[in-house]
Image (cartoon, helix red, strand yellow):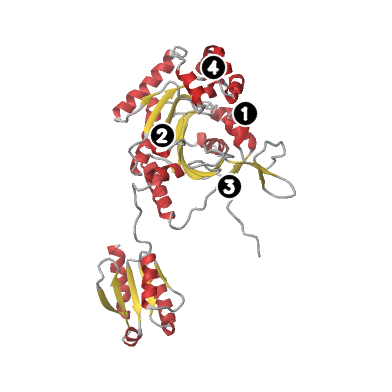
Amino acid sequence: MAKQFFIPRGTSDILPSEIPFWQALENTARTICRLYGYQEIRTPIFEETELFARSMGQTSDVVQKQMLRVLAGPRDFQETLQNSEDSLAGVLRPEGTAAIVRSYIENDFDKRESLSKLFYMGAMFRGERPQKGRLRQFHQIGVEAIGPSSSSPYLDADVIALSVNLLKACGLTNFKLKINTLGTLENKKAFYELLKRKLQPQLTELCEDCQQRFERNVLRILDCKNEKCRTIVRQTSFGRDWLTQDSQNYFNAVKQALDMLNIVFEDDPYLVRGLDYYTHTVFEISDSSLGSQDALGAGGRYNNLVSELGGPQVDAVGFALGMERILLAQQGKNKPCDSFIDVFIIAMDAQYTKNAFLLLQEVRRCNLSADMSYQAGSLKSQMRLANKLSARFVMILGEDEIKNQEVTLKNMQNGMQEKIALNSIREKLDKLKIER
């Protein structure tokens, strides 16, 4: 008996019954992004390892533990969860921002436009421990606004509004938006030192990971999911005195702009992102219905990443939303179009299969979706198949229809039937297309 193969752990098949929901989400995302003036960009699914190590930070959990590397060697494209200096071919992308910035630099976007507004959709990869809402291959919708003229609190607010309105367009209403500021790089350094002073007395009470984070990057302690660590952090007052007045004014302007847009948010001084490149505004959107993995998406400003990756000194802001998370939160709240095909053609006898096949092509030439059973079967079994495909109409070819050069057209919504002469079938099909 041949070996049976199974899907790799931490991945999932997207089955035909699920595709309409994915397509509806993708269509909504494209519509909203274009409404805000963003253009779609597509980058490779693997990049140089150093691109993400430099952008996300060598001490980030993603770089330390989660990157899926692509190895060059006797076996092309071997994947491993282990860190390796042999990862010559690169790494499967764990997020989209660094790849977009790489493309922005490589394709000289800054020489063509003062503000590049880009959006993307696609698969990302991380060596996570799989659970509901957290996969090793997952999909994101993201936007990035990059360029010399991108430094404005109003753009921050507009990007946040885009993410909120995209989720609302997907039928979600119970999510929560949290925002914070990290200030400039100099402000972050001051905050870093403040955190070390404040948390030093309780260092031994922190989890093992946070004790290591204390030495490598103390900011990451604020993002720890360990309940004891979270309690210690919440009981420690940090204030915002480490921010310069300009940074405070910038953040206040972002909040005022969100108020103008009637976007409800929570100002959370403990919110930080797990990636090194963020400066100034950071935000996160969560939905409690998702359970422990409740983040729908997150984003913020990253004013130094482009120059750190070898490009010009330009500012940027963006976000990414998890598509699987959105679909989980949508369950029971939306429904894609019921009709899968327009016309299903039934041959009442095997000898009429040729006629049905030719009619099938004629229907498709009229830009109507159509299908048929390629094996003879009873009317009942073929009608059952038409129902399974959610056909709007059924065309029946039997002995009488062939003799009279006509077809029987049945409306599957109301059950009405009519005879259509074959020489006027195109005219009828054009009407069906208009009514669709």
Looking at the image, is mark 2 or mark 3 nearer the viewer? 3
Sequence-wise first label, 4 or 2: 4
Query: Which residue corresponds to the image point at 54% horizontal and 24% vertical from the top-left?
Result: 220
Looking at the image, is mark 2 or mark 1 nearer the viewer? 2
User: Which residue bears the numbered disc 4?
Assistant: 192
Q: Between marks 3 and 1, how big is the CA–CA gap?
A: 26 Å
Amino acid type indicated by mark 2: Ser
User: Which residue bears the numbered disc 2?
Assistant: 286
Task: Give residue 379's quadrant in the image.
Answer: bottom left
Sequence-wise first label, 2 or 1: 1
Let me know if residue 49 appears in the view: yes
Let me know if residue 312 appears in the view: no
Q: Residue furthest right?
A: 74
Residue 97 placement, left or right of 328: right
The disc label shown at residue 58, or none: 1
The x and y percentages for residue 329 are: 39, 42
Sequence-wise first label, 4 or 3: 3
Sequence-wise first label, 3 or 1: 3
User: Which residue bears the numbered disc 3?
Assistant: 9
Amino acid type indicated by mark 1: Gln
